[in-house]
Amino acid sequence: MKALIQPHYIALFLFSLFSFPAHSADPNAGASLADNCSGCHGHNGISKTAQWPNLAAQKPGYLVNQLQAFKADQRIDPVMQSMAKSLTTADMNNLAAHFASLPPGKAGDNSQIAKIGQEKAGMCMGCHGKNGLGSAQTPRLAGQHADYLVKQLRNFKNGSRKNSTMKAISSNLSEEDMAQVATFFASVP
């Protein structure tokens, strides 16, 4: 009996090592770093330009993954690659904690197109959650600029942004479908 219990505790201990972050993120430290982001992403994480994403209320795990991808040149955007190169892992975690702590924005409202888009957005909610609120590893789509979402769907479709699931989904969307789905998510706070 004792021999069976010990491996169980060892496995539990090892699992716990990978279940918790190496350090806790500091949103206040992230706020001071976020000054460098505000030119494009706004002072409160709400971009004034539809081509740049809102970061407010975005999932921290997703933000960290994207910053790491920019830093490793796995996601291509010259400005973001340059910005991410100087960030440490702690900086990325702190920035993500800061933006995740901000209230979400609402990027637009065209209720007629949004209603059509809502009907088509069901396929998105399996990964991105109810109304596109995101999950630990998938981005929040709610309140994001429609133009930005369409741009990213096009990038997945043409292969310039890599993700096999999103490539398969976007390949089945027409330009009109993309615009309608994006307008729906932009209308959700």
Image (cartoon, rainbow, N blue to C red):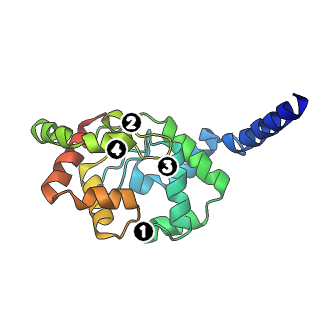
Residue underneath mark 4: 141
Q: Which residue is mark 3?
A: 62
- Can you tell which of label 1 and label 3 is closer to the viewer? 3
Q: Which residue does the image show at 65% across and 42% down from the upper left?
A: 25
Distance CA(mark 2)–CA(mark 4) = 10 Å
In front: label 2 or label 4: 4
Q: Is residue 104 left or right of residue 187?
A: right
Residue placed under numbered mark 1 in the picture: 77
Most foreground residue, 147 or 118: 118
State the residue position of label 2: 104
Viewer-nearest residue: 131 or 124: 124
Q: Are marks 4 and 1 in contact (CB under 8 Å)?
A: no
Tell me the quadrant of the picture where the C terminus can be found.
Answer: top left
Residue 120 spot, x, y in % from top left: 19, 43
> Of marks 1 and 3, which one's residue comes earlier in the chain?
3
Left/right of residue 153 with respect to residue 180 in the rendered view: right
Q: Secondary structure at mark 3?
A: helix
Task: Mark 3 vs mark 2: give the one in front.
Answer: 3
The answer to whether residue 20 is seen in the rendering is no
For the N terminus, the image quarter is top right
Q: Is residue 180 left or right of residue 35?
A: left
Q: Residue furthest right?
A: 2
Q: Secondary structure at mark 4?
A: loop
In three-dimensional space, the C-alpha distance between marks 3 and 2, rounded to whole angstroms, equals 15 Å
Along the line of sight, which residue is nearer the eye, 63 or 124? Answer: 124
CA distance for labels 1 and 3: 17 Å
Give how far apart the Cα atoms at labels 2 and 1 are: 24 Å
Q: Given the current orientation, which residue lies at the most extreme top position?
A: 1
- Label 2 crowd bin: few (<14), some (14–19), many (20+), radius 10 Å: many
